[in-house]
Image (cartoon, rainbow, N blue to C red):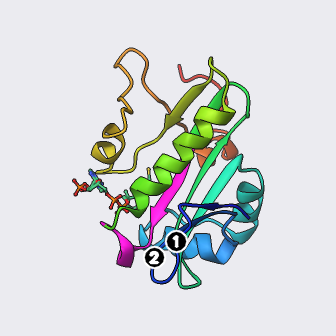
Amino acid sequence: MRKHNAAAGDEVTLIENLPTADQYLHLRAQNHWRPVSTAEVETAMANSLFSLLAVHQNRIVGCARIVGDGGLYFYVQDLIVDEDYRGKNIGTRMLQALLEWLAKNAGSNAFVGLMAADGTEGFYSRFGFERRPGNRPGMSISIASLQEGRNISPSM
Ligand SMILES: CC(C)(COP(=O)(O)OP(=O)(O)OC[C@H]1O[C@@H](n2cnc3c(N)ncnc32)[C@H](O)[C@@H]1OP(=O)(O)O)[C@@H](O)C(=O)NCCC(=O)NCCS
């Protein structure tokens, strides 16, 4: 494990490590994000390119990671600060550490994106993240609709 902004005593320390499924699920549940399984989380975390934990007195109080193909496409994902610890600059420190990692590890033609959660656009725009233009929107599809066979073919 490597420490970022290592600090002693009462400070929150950033550590390069994966959350356990329970740690991640706990942080995720605070935001009422849709439920996911432990097996899905274990697979997801293991496939991260880079992952940070924020630790305060042995308690995991935040996580953040980079996912992607490691070559051309990188996404900031799962940046979460424990609700008892928000507004203490921890999210900013974690995003800064993710961006430092990207600057060192992504090639000069790489794309860096994220899906901002409701109400967080301002948090990211402080760093220079920009909303995509209307003619190049981010798009998503429900996996349930694919598994039910509804969206496998184009609609008429
Ligand atoms: C968004 C989040 C990660 C921010 O972490 P944090 O540690 O509370 O934020 P910080 O203390 O580093 O905030 C630093 C600055 O960003 C601002 N900020 C924080 N959250 C913000 C938001 N949602 N929108 C706009 N600005 C925000 C703060 O006002 C602060 O500015 P200030 O210093 O001028 O007061 C945290 O609120 C969180 O975990 N939210 C729930 C999970 C989530 O939605 N994550 C984003 C997934 S895309």
Residue 22 in magenta stretch: no
Check disc 1 and report its element: helix, strand or loop. loop
Q: Residue furthest top?
A: 135
Say which element carries label 2.
Answer: loop
Does the rendering let one see residue 68?
Answer: yes
Name the residue nearer the viewer: 14 or 70: 14
Q: Amino acid at mark 1?
A: Ala
Measured from the top left, where is residue 47 in percent x and y? Answer: 76, 50
Residue occupying the far front of the picture:
8
Q: Position of residue 88 (x, y in %)?
A: 33, 67
Q: Quadrant of residue 111?
A: top right
Residue 86 drawn in magenta: yes
Q: Quadrant of the N terminus?
A: bottom right
Whether residues under marks 2 and 1 lie with C-beta atoms below 8 angstroms apart, the answer is yes
Identify the residue shown where x is 55% and y is 38%. 141
Q: Is residue 124 left or right of residue 140?
A: left
Cβ at disc 1 under 8 Å from ligand 1: no
Q: Which residue is mark 1?
A: 7
Q: Is residue 135 above or below residue 12?
A: above
Figure quadrant of residue 151: top right
Crowd tier of the residue under label 1, counting other residues whose Cα lies within 10 Å: few below 14, some 14–19, many 20 or above: few
**Where, by quadrant of the figure, is residue 10 drawn?**
bottom left
Q: Nearer the viewer, residue 24 or 49?
A: 49
**Residue range of the region highlighted in magenta in the rendering:** 76-87
Q: Is residue 64 left or right of residue 17?
A: left
Question: Residue beneath label 2, please?
Answer: 11
What amino acid does circle 2 point to? Glu
- At 70% from the left edge and 61% from the top edge, which residue is drawn? 2
From what the image shows, is residue 5 above or below residue 117? below
